[in-house]
Amino acid sequence: MKVLICLLTLLAGPAVALASGGSDAGTLVDLTQTAWGYLGVLLFVGAYALVPFENSIHLRKSKPVLMAAGIIWVLVAIAYVQIGDTHTAHEAIKHSLLEYAELFLFLLVAMTYINSLEDRFVFLRLRGFLVSRGYSLVKIYWITGLLAFLISPIADNLTTALLMGAVVMAVGGANKKFVVLACINIVVAANAGGAFSPFGDITTLMVWQKGKVQFLEFFVLFIPALVNWLVPGVIMMLAIGKGNPEAGEDNVQMKYGAVPMIILFLFTIVTAVCFHNFLHLPPAAGMMLGLGYLGFFSYHIKMHEGRYNKYDPILGVRNSVPFNPQYATSKRTKSISHIMDSIPYPAFAINLERKVTHWNKYVEELTGVPAKDRIGTDKYWSPFRSEKTKILVDMVLDNAPEKEFEKLYQGEHHESDIIQSGHEAAVFLPNIGEHGTRLIMTAAPVRDKSGHVIGAIEIVRDAAEFTSETAHFDLMTRIARAEWDTLLFFYGVILCVGGLSQFGYLGLVSQFMYTGLGATYANSLVGVLSAIVDNIPVMYAVLTMDPIMSHGQWLLVTLTAGVGGSMLSIGSAAGVALMGTARGVYTFGAHLKWTPVIALGYGLSILVHLWLNSSLMHIMK
């Protein structure tokens, strides 16, 4: 029965992947053959099975694992109470909570810095620079791959992939073959780059915080990680062909304080390293000190903006949306007119028949088209597009699915955080202004008292003006915009893993993998499992099992967990993110065609590590 449970755990993926430090809290009792243990495994497998379908069923990945975490610990507590132990479960869950607290604080600061740099247009500036150069497709392929490899060790692979993916889609356009190959190259490069830095991936961060590998020791993985990227990169390049896309006009200037903020982020990383290496304090404490750096610098920005006597709103509560349509009264036209009159920006409204009902004076000034030529017609699109096509207000009125928004705006669209059913998008339109203009558009439906949609409103603003009016840097807003779904997902994973570890299942897995297969084969298998499930819970499992391994083997499992997810598009956050932004082009099937080539790079990277770092592969006595 133990062997059966072990094999079921491995095949199910999530159960292999779950672990936190529950077993360190006290003497571990074997509860693997109890009904509570079986129920805990099935509960977690069921909850985690929903995670890969997040984008299709629209259930955020944090929700099922949060539910599973709470119930699993109820089962753990009941199991221990039945054997007369009311203390062990309490201490074990405290240990898991401490594990999570350190990871949470570290990631919260890192996410806040990334959001702050994004607010200062650091990433948009880089993107605009690349798009406007007019490089060949092959050059863009290698530049985006190289930047993904070099940026991901500092930023996370998700942000890196989205940034480089936006460049690829802006340059590649209708060349689907190039977009697919470049996206795969970015995913492989971002995951490989994150493998040789403690800050490059959650798994490397966990290994570093556990003290298994010291900060500078990660860099011995640089050459194996480079091989992991370059081997498939070179092979895929041969399929691109020749081509020189037209240079774009998307050139964005960074906001005030961008460069000092980059320096502060790097200094924060140095602080975290010093806390860990020299002061023997948790790196998360150093990162929180770095958040203090950013806090004081945000105060300096506030002084620069002349907001001397104004607090930043708590948790970033601020109405940053330029209009907020209210429910219409029975006097529909009068109600919408009131809304339009209250908007001091270019705006227009359409009804359900797609006829223009309002065309305010500001949109007249922006487009040069008087209201009398548009009201009552369906030509609201013509000042913005050269041929008839759907624009943002149409998508909102149709309640279009997310994939249609992404297809039209390619990563520069998001739902409004404040207006129900509202959407915001950015696009460069050559028809507006002498040399074209980058516009920020916001659209939302208008409803009557019964809640029925009776039309929609869209405002269209010059991005430069929008930037100057929303340039106020609010630290609390940056914190509030952290990836809370991801942070809560980590809570669920760590607590679920801790509970299953407390039942004793991780001991079975450890015995099968590291005693039965041997460390090298087991660590290589970890990378394969990372492609099927997710590298984060897999690495938690390994750290919780804490097998007796040489230093070289700990480096090997760090490498494989980091790069193994590249073999499938669903195996890493970078791949999943690009499938969303390049929806319908970069797909699971498109990636799967190149999996053998990526697997070749994966295997060669392991062999290179075993060869270059052979002196580290033996346990020191």
Image (cartoon, helix red, strand yellow):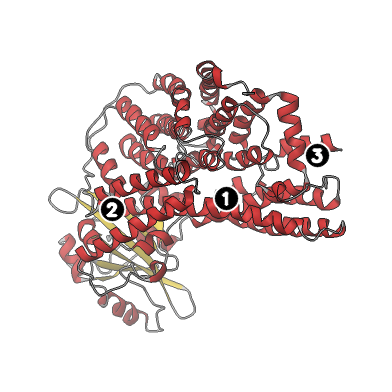
Residue at screen point 29% across, 25% down: 243
Query: Circle 3 sits on which residue?
Result: 5
Mark on residue 54?
1
> Which of 379/447 is in front?
447
> Nearer the N terminus, badge 1 or badge 3?
3
Q: Percent x, y for residue 283?
A: 47, 47
Q: Are marks 3 and 2 in contact (CB under 8 Å)?
A: no
- Residue at the spot of label 2: 120
For this view, does 38 lie left or right of residue 285? right
Q: Secondary structure at mark 3?
A: helix
Could you tell me the amino acid type at mark 1?
Glu
Disc 2 is placed on an element classified as: loop
Does label 1 or label 2 sit earlier along the sequence? 1
Determine whether 135 is above or below 87 in the image.
above
Residue type, label 2: Arg
> Where does the image place residue 169, in percent across and percent down from the top left?
36, 39
> Left of 194 or right of it: where is 252?
left
User: Going by the image, does 425 lie left or right of 300?
Assistant: right
617 or 180: nearer the viewer: 617
Badge 1 crowding class, 10 Å Cα cut-off, few under 14, some 14 to 19, many 20 or more, is few
Quarter location, residue 18:
top right
- Mark 3–mark 2 Cα distance, whole angstroms, equals 51 Å
- Whether 264 is drawn above or below 445: the answer is above
Residue 54 picture location, percent across and down = 57, 50
